[in-house]
Image (spheres, coloured by chain):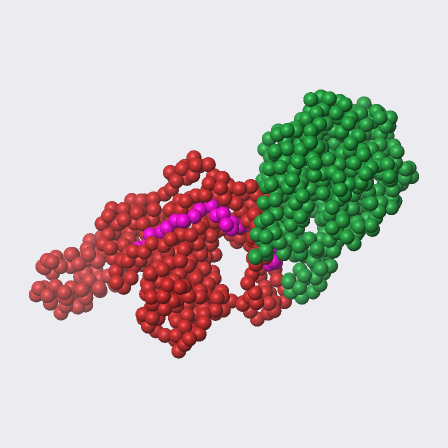
Chain colours: A green, B red
Amino acid sequence: MIRKSANEMAASLASGEVTSVELTKAHFARIEEVDVKVRAFLHLDTEGALASASVIDERRKKGEELPPLAGVPLALKDVLVQKNVPTTCGSKILQGWRPPYDATVVKNLKKNGVVILGKTNMDEFAMGSSTENSAFHPTHNPWDLTRIPGGSGGGSSAAISSFEAPLAIGTDTGGSIRQPAAVTGTVGVKPTYGGVSRYGLVAFSSSLDQAGPCARTVLDAALLHEAIAGHDEKDSTSIDAPVPKVVEAARRGDVKGVRIGVIKELQGEGYQAGVLERFQESLDILSGLGAEIVEVSCPSFDYALPAYYLIAPSECSSNLARFDAMRFGLRVGEGSAEEVMNATREAGFGREVKRRIILGTYALSSGYYDAYYGSAQKVRTLIKNDFEKAFLSADVLVSPTAPTTAFKIGEKSDDPLAMYLNDIATIPVNLAGICAISIPSGLAKEDSLPAGFQVMAPAMADDRLYNVGAALERELLAKWSKPLLDFAPELA
Amino acid sequence: MAMKYDQVVSAFDPVLGLEVHVELGTKSKMFCGCATLFGAEPNTQVCPVCLGLPGSLPVVNRKAIEYTIAIGLALNCSIAPYSRFARKNYFYPDMPKNFQTSQYDEPICKNGYLDLEVETEDGIKEFRVDIERVHMEEDTGKSLHVGGATGRIHGADYSLLDYNRAGIPLVEIVTKTIEGTGKYAPLVAKAYVKELRDILRSLGVSDVKMEQGSLRCDANVSLRPMGEKKLGTRSETKNVNSLRSVERAVRAEMIRHAGILETGGKVKQETRHFHENTGETTAGRSKEQAEDYRYFQEPDLIPIAPADSWIDEIRKNLPERPSERRKRLQSAWSVPDKEMAAMVNADVLDLVAETVELGADPTKARGWWLGEIARIANENEKWAGELPISPVNVKELIDLINAGELTDKLARQVVEGVINGEGSPKEVVAQRGFKVVSDDTALMEAIERAITTQPDVADKVRNGHIPAAGALIGAVMKDTKGQADAAKVRSLLLKHLGQSE
């Protein structure tokens, strides 16, 4: 049962073949069995999950009509607050904090009857591409436990790829949903900025952060997408428009006549040969299905990475100022308020977080603002313009999701620049506020590890991602004759 | 050696800049739905947003924008079709997010002015103060530092934090440099804050109570030698919290600056605190380096783009300008300039107007508010409006006098009773047993008694020496415990002694 898709589980629940309590228990058993190796979770809410599962079972027994995902378990990235459940953001500074409120995403999940199993590991405050920056422990890639599961949402993608949960929520500031999806052979979507409420998502970089679905199939991702998306008056940047019809698109999967633009700047140097090979294969499949392949150029993408590493740290230097020991979380040291603040921040934040706070503080300071933050904002406009232009000649744009497959734990921890380069293909999407999906494109020949195929669409055209993704997924599944995850080694 | 004020203004040309912070009277906070009641139990009007809990997000209070636009329009500003919030970053324990959501380079209102009529020893002088900007921001929480000598954060044993005030909408109104006021600078500063306060009150956007901090003024003062164009170094006196203090603080700073400049010294650019008891300012905690607030656009909020139709609607609903209202009332009540100025200075114009609206005679209403009530207010170092006596009470009092049920003298005691909390004028009259003796028989008996005890005075009156009657009238009033109508006693007495006025 745990290897089924969320959609299949929902069907089994609806038919009475299995109860939500049974399904939830099965996942907890799997977690108990394999999470000592994978370490995807930071906190399990066994009691809460079973309680909500039994509520769903009761309601179903009474004959109530339930939402599509009612009773299906899910793993929640520990950057979203859940009332009375520990929320750490992978940081010591929040150790022991139990939020007094639910994030809108969590509210929506509860409203949809989704059972939240627990909170997943992540790079501290979502800063990283490997989940090694978690203050608690690294998470291991189920494909090869010596490798990283991607980041920052490595816990969420490791949980679904190791069958600890069929669904997970991630957040994507520069690729934190898509890159982990790519390196674990799963599906991850960064919805349009403003498509999913950020209320209750602990901010790393407010203008870039976006929560989204992680799943094993395109349809599962679409079902979860519909459950969490929509306008929220508590988030001023939330878009007041109907949610794009993503489930319908995921069921359609028809790319005949769809114009697919290959971004010239997102391939070639720096990309692993096996990753590029899988990318080309997917393109050929789509072309064979009747899609029109065109090449587009986005010259300003060369500046995306530096712009991102000015904007995101700048916003984070301000967003993380509130972690000051005054009202919640860790408090260390004695003496004046200032001394306690300093001691707490010194002890509570990890190296990468401090690095980015310092970087951002510098980029915003007077005398440097124009050269750094100001210029980065201009680059952002150029990137938006590049996308707009590209979308004139293509309905969706594509690239490999990450330039390489999963690297070894520890391999890049002393080289932040090499680490940052892993997000080169995912970052432009966040800077432009548009949407993108990563779907598994197969295994790279040199290391037999999963690679990801990224599809990008204009803002609020999220349905296009699912349409193209579903078509490709169907063809690849036929080619492999079984789901990609079935090629992964047994963990138990 | 401090210079005399007239020496200061003959040698130096003062330049002012005034920043006024106003707490808006919205029911909810700037970025969340929490209540804004003053004086609630600490930390009872808070939520994840105004506590800055991780994950929370601000949503702009539409009413606060409406109020700010109204202020901008009343101050003749242009309203920006597009403005943004920014973050002002600095660490302070009572600031939940460690940044203040404010407006920086894109304020909502710009380039206005306020015309003032300033009462000086040389008569009424007119000045125009140019307004640079009006912008929105949020208030911080409040710290209470316990222990230590100064009540400041340094040296305190521990600090208590109350976040009820955190997130209350604030509007900051900043003037351009105010030049050419010369010796009238302190008066202009005071008149500006007063006129601004009256406008804000008439708009109903704030309770503008300086003593509670809902209106606070920072006064920037600099001096330059006469004829010099270049501005001198300024000092900023923070949080001056009464109109009188605004005037005194500016004057004190002018004298202090002049003393430094006169001896070849340099004025330090710093913040100062004004002390009401000494009338002097002292330096605030000096910062070793200039504060860098690292302003940047608030990414959690979308730009404010008020529709023209909304601005027009706010403009249409603006109340009468206080200066125009004053002119209208003065002519309606036929009040001489001096009396009008007295009402304005004592800040009782609104109270008189309300009393008149209730149907009282303007002259009488003015008489009470400027007379007995103002006297008691003065005695208690309060403003008449703060005393527990209302226009309704005063109207009732005047009615009682008109009906002959109270004498002026008794009425003054009634005012005292009302202020003491003894109830409405009628209730005070009943409780204190005041009753005008208007019964002729009773009065005649008292008059007879007075004549009997002072026969020689009575004779003087009989012989036509009318002023002597005062002693007899006084005796009658004493006899009737002040409850007789003195005018009536006088006419009865004169008639009885065969005289007339």
The residue sitting at the bottom extreme is: B1
Residue A241 percent across, percent down from the top left:
60, 30
Toward which corner of the image does residue B217 lie, by quadrant?
Answer: bottom left
Vertical order, A99 against A467 (above or below)? below
Magenta-drawn stretch contains A181: no
B313 or B482, nearer to the observer? B313
Q: Residue at x 22, y 49 (%)?
A: B334
* Res A198 visible: no
> For this view, does B193 lie left or right of residue A367?
left
Q: Residue at x 29, y 62 (%)?
A: B120
Magenta-drawn stretch contains B104: yes
**Range drawn in magenta:** B91-117
Residue B215 percent across, percent down from the top left:
45, 55
* Res B80 visible: yes
* Quarter in which the C terminus of chain A is drawn: top right
Residue A392 percent across, percent down from the top left:
61, 30
Q: Residue at x 59, y 65 (%)?
A: B153
A229 or A52, nearer to the observer? A229
Total of numbered circles in the picture?
Answer: 0
B427 or A21, nearer to the observer? A21
* Quarter in which the N terminus of chain A is drawn: top right
Residue B362 percent across, percent down from the top left:
26, 49
Vertical order, B78 against A342 (above or below)? above
> For this view, does B35 lie left or right of residue A122?
left
